[in-house]
Amino acid sequence: MQIPLWPNGAPGFENRKDETEQAQDWWVRNVHNPSVTVFLPAKEKATRVAVIICPGGGHQNIVYNTNA
């Protein structure tokens, strides 16, 4: 399930809305309509515990490292 942070798009993104997202190895760029993605376990494995993962970076890149 994806939940947009701004239902009508991020403020000020209008002039960049046609730029496609780019991703490579450990970064993602051109995220102009950010969202939160929810991954739910199967009901029989649900423990009512949650983990929030926030990739680092800034307004230019989202950076993550899967080897950490």
Image: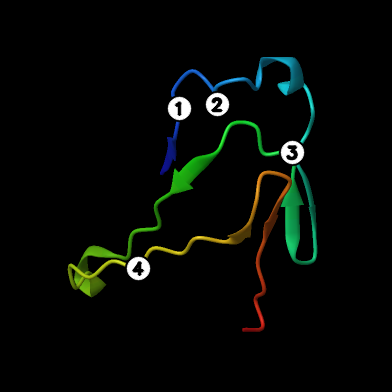
Instruction: Tell me the CA gap for discs 4 and 1.
Output: 22 Å
Residue 54 shown left or right of residue 14 in the figure? left
The crowding category of the residue bearing disc 4, from other C-alpha atoms within 10 Å (few below 14, some 14 to 19, many at least 20), is few
Give the mark, 4 or 1, whose residue is nearer the N terminus: 1
Sequence order check: which comes first, mark 2 or mark 3?
A: 2
Q: CA distance from mark 3 to mark 1?
A: 16 Å
Kind of residue sitting beneath label 1? Trp
Q: Secondary structure at mark 1?
A: loop
Q: Which residue is mark 1?
A: 6
Q: Residues within 10 Å of mark 3 (few under 14, many from 20)?
A: some
**Residue 22 image point, x, y percent:** 80, 45
Helix, strand or loop at mark 4 = loop
User: Can you identify the residue that label 3 sits on?
Assistant: 30
Most extreme residue toward the bottom is 68
**What amino acid type is highlighted by mark number 2?**
Ala
- Marks 1 & 2, CB-CB < 8 Å contact: yes
Quarter in which the N terminus is drawn: top left
Amino acid carrying label 4: it is Val
Q: Nearer the viewer, residue 32 or 66?
A: 32
Is 35 drawn above or below residue 15 in the view shown?
Answer: below
Image location (x, y in percent) of residue 18? 77, 21
Real-space Cα distance between discs 4 and 3?
25 Å
Pointer 2 residue? 10
The type of residue carrying mark 3 is: Asn
Give the CA distance from mark 2 to mark 3.
12 Å
Q: Are marks 3 and 1 in contact (CB under 8 Å)?
A: no
Other-residue count near label 2 (Cα within 10 Å), few / some / many at <14 / 14–19 / ≥20: some
Q: Identify the residue at image location x=62%, y=20%.
A: 12
Q: Could you say whether the residue bearing mark 2 is in a helix, strand or loop?
A: loop
